[in-house]
Image (tube, helix red, strand yellow):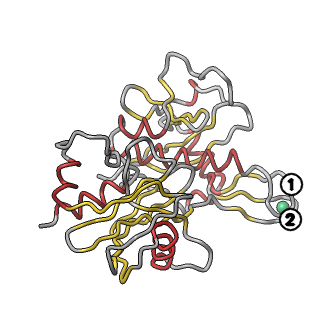
Amino acid sequence: MLSFTGNPLDRASAERADPDWVSAQRARPDARFLPIWQTKPLLVGERAGFLEAFRLHPEPDAACVFLGLREGQPLFAVAMADSEVPPLAGLGEFHDMRAAAFLLPDADTAIAGQAKALIDWHRRHRFCAQCGAETATRDGGYRRLCPACGAEHYPRTDPVVIMLPLLGEECLVGRNARFPLGLYSAFAGFIEPGETMEEAVARELKEEVSLAISAVRYHASQPWPFPSSLMLGCYADAAAKDFCIDAREIEDARWMTKEEARDRLAGKIEDAIKMPTAIAIARRLIADWAAKP
Ligand SMILES: [Zn+2]
């Protein structure tokens, strides 16, 4: 399964609007809490580190968000104080979310990603964007309400298009200057206001590689909590093979045949070129296309 997808929780959207219901869930003896410290989730072994309430000593005003019900059991995420030394010593280890995604089972990765994105949003949105007053948490953490001006603020999800241009039996992969050494991947960019997904794909490919396209096909999506993106994976039919990189963003691009892509994904070619990692939707786009006869 694609990393960060397949979240099994019942988010209880109707019930969580009632603060008494949320408080009752928090007080249940079977309620469990996933600590997030500096955007890192706690892991206990290779599972998400959900702990009992009495093991946590969060600050009184620490963000605590309702994640959902797992087979009826209430799960929360809680922000730990921004200490230099990791808290909860001896109970587990805090891992960078990307590293955690390689260790955790799929469902735990999806839940931890949801927790990380929400806690991170609360950390960065304590004050009203309209009037500057401190806002208060509502709906178990899915809304912040400004007591001064009444504005409501909702957790952000930022749509990003990520696309693999295709022509015949070849795909175009590129190297962003910020990529790890040797990595070639799909192209990506944020959707801008007033733009459809298809228009964003066409614009980004025109800007980054001057590639003209004739059609866009949606393939799959992936929540990507760095900090709060939704990746919209697409294929784009190139009108011609010619391209020209914009050196401000793209270091290099190259057409790759299906056979080469299959061999590289299988680790059969040993050179400096690397494919996207297993948790990236870019790898899924390349692999699903290359697997088709
Ligand atoms: Zn306000």
Q: Residue at x 17, y 61 (%)?
A: 291
Report if the CB atoms under discs 1 and 2 are less than 8 Å apart: yes
Say above or below: 58 vs 160.
Answer: above
Where residue 177 appears, as percent x and y from the top left, is 50, 50
Query: Residue at horizontal 58%, vertical 38%?
Result: 39
The quadrant of the rendered image in which ligand 1 is seen is bottom right
58 with respect to 35 (left or right) = right
The front one of 237 and 107 is 237
Estimate how packed mark 2 is, as few (under 14), some (14 to 19) or many (20 or more) residues with alpha carbons within 10 Å. few
The yes-or-no answer for disc 2 within 8 Å of ligand 1 is yes
- Along the line of sight, which residue is nearer the eye, 266 or 122? 266
- Label 1 environment density (alpha carbons within 10 Å; few <14, some 14–19, many ≥20): some
Question: Residue 133, labelled with which disc?
Answer: 1
Q: Secondary structure at mark 1?
A: loop
Q: Is residue 13 above or below residue 265?
A: below
Closer-to-camera residue (38/45): 38
Above/below status of 49 relative to 153: above
Above or below, 27 against 122 in this view is: above
Residue at (64, 50) in percent of width and height: 121
- Residue 149 numbered mark, or none: 2
Tell me which amino acid carries mark 2.
Cys
In the rendered image, residue 273, in percent from the top left (x then y), is placed at 31, 45
Q: Give the camera-side residue of 44 and 201.
A: 201
Q: x%, y% of residue 20?
A: 65, 51
Q: Residue at x 21, y 74 (%)?
A: 168
Type of the residue with mark 1: Ala
SS at mark 2? loop
